[in-house]
Image: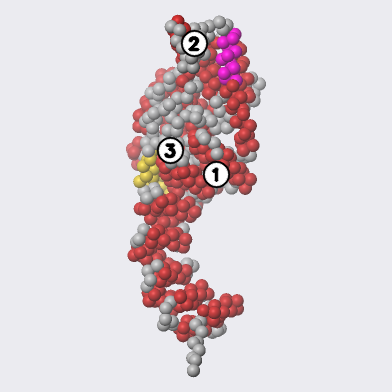
Amino acid sequence: MNDNQPLVSQPLSLTGYSITIDAPTTYTMTDSEKGVQNLNPSGLLADESHPLVQNSNPGDDNPCTQSTSYNAAQVANGCVTGDSEVDEITSAATDNLARHEADSSVHAHIVNYGSVNGVPSDVVDYHSSGVVEYGGASVVSDAHADAHAEAQQFIEVYSLEEERLWDAVRVNCLDFNSWTALIEETEKVAEANILKIRKVYDAFLAEFPLCFGYWKKYADHEARLHSANEVLEVYERAILAVTYSVDIWLHYCVFAISIYEDPDIIRRLFERGLAYVGTDYLSYPLWDEYIRYEESQQAWSNLAMIYTRIFEHPIQQLDRYFNCFKDLAASRALSEIRTHEEAALLASASLESNFEGAHGEVCPDGVEQSSKPVSAGLTEVEELEKYIAIREDMYMKAKEFDSKIIGFETAIRRPYFHVRPLDDPELENWHNYLDFIERGDDFNKVVKLYERCLIACANYPEYWIRYVLCMEASGSMELAVNALARATQVFVKKQPEIHLFAARFKERSGDILGARSQYELLYSEISPGLLEAIQKHVNMEYRLGNKEDALSIFEKAIAAEQEKEPSQILPMLFILYSRFLYLVSGNAEKARDVFSRVLENTQLSKPLLEAAIHLESILPFPKRIDYVDLLVENFITPNAEHCYTASTADREDISCTFLETKPKPQRVHL
């Protein structure tokens, strides 16, 4: 897809914390794409499995005309099959692909920026042939319900090391090292048990959906132990999870080439992938594979059109592509590399020019239009030069833009996802790159760069927040909501910062129920007792005019903390509750009662005493000076009955605070 193409988004439906995506059914092709054969899909693409055809290095000796001999793979269940069996496998996989296309309404060339990129409710449930169970969760695929009983027969049998590692990931689902160790152990002890392998990969990829290498390993296991249909399912889930990964689209396309003989099926998958990642600066491996495939088909006009489309974008190795294009133009007749559509368009323009010239029509500016055909008088050599010149102009414009972004691109050291932190210069470079692209007027470029950024920076809430705010400012609320859901449900789901932002964002958007749920999830499950979340929730209810609900939040939080021994936040909760009662509700007596209860039943501390002193200083008369004086005395005087002894600095601070706020006696004038 061209970055200048109008954005196609999709409706987004959120139910609780899961996402349902309805794909669009329209697509507007760019001028360059119109020259490619009509690839109206009758089925998406399936992936073959094993072995993977390796992508040739673009720097090899003959980078322009490398070709790969593609034959239908004869692999099923890990065994070589005969031609009739291959036909049966291919037919089944094609039918399965057609079903996927019908179910998802995904059409060729669609660029869908609402793509999920890793929400587990969609990725794991998409097609899980076993049972995903860890940490109390269980997912069973409807498509393989009959395999569930069989799965149960092995699920309970684990080695001691497997048990230990499963326990580790149940305790901490984000422990990447334990996950990878568990996968290795499972592959070792269950080499031929696909159900067990599915279980561990499904569970791992629900937590780390951007790990495209593990999707590839999963597909390889399915290819080794099962059938092409299952490989297809894995790749379909993979591109749902990591839609903007060049690598996963490359693996998927290579799989398709190895199992399908129908070029239209293979081209549809290439077009589908390039619609998402074709403008990625590092997308050249996928373009190279597409070029090699068209070379193997000797589809010279398609090949020339691929080069033309590449020149629209500043991608890496652009010079190499232009040189290859010139070699193609020099080695083939113009009639071979010009598409039927282009030839028809030129013929139509020529006829129109002849017709207008014959009737002596006058142009709007008053100049008589020439009756000379567009290409009249041009030799084939001159036409070829013109053909190349047009593409050279596109290439030069792409090179000009490349000169503006090359500094940002070369500073990206890790374009893929990993749990290891990125260094500060690389993080800053992403911000600077986003700033630069946002200053332009191409919204599609902005979206695609954010999606690239959020593969490498998926663990950083600041980039998700920035993305959401950018989409909101541009009026693309569906994209904003989708990005926020991905952040809060998958990538930074354990970080309070993103949930606080999500709650405030939902409140501003009018989703009050969603904001409440976000706050409650945060201080009840994600970060139990988080004071900031409790206070912000209270403030939201107060803004909405729900004073009783605000007080109820404090009371429930205090009750929950009183059951804990010890509670680190209980004193502060009492302080906040008391202040809210007086300053917001205007209930001075209840505010005093809160402090009376806590000071009589809780160990004296500096924050509690400071809050009690402050409250008495702002309350109207009569003031309980003697009561506060006794509390201060007990705090600053060493007492053998109390195990707690305040530090000298704390005792001095409390004494000074009390004396400064203590009312001065009134002078009596005689």
Q: Name the residue under label 2.
A: 368
Q: Colour mode?
A: secondary structure
Pick whichever, 539 or 100, lies toward us: 539
Please state if 395 lies on the left or on the right of 465 as rendered.
right
First in sequence, mark 3 or 1: give its number: 3
**Residue 24 in view of the camera:** yes
Residue 456 pos. (x, y %): 55, 42
**First to last magenta residue range:** 380-392
Q: Is mark 2 on a helix, strand or loop?
A: loop
Between the C-alphas of marks 3 and 1, the distance is 18 Å
- State the image quarter where residue 63 is shown: top right
Q: Is mark 3 on a helix, strand or loop?
A: loop
Give the residue type at disc 1: Cys
- Disc 1: which residue: 457
- Amino acid type at circle 2 is Glu
Residue carrying label 3: 114
Q: Distance between the residues labelled 2 and 1?
A: 59 Å
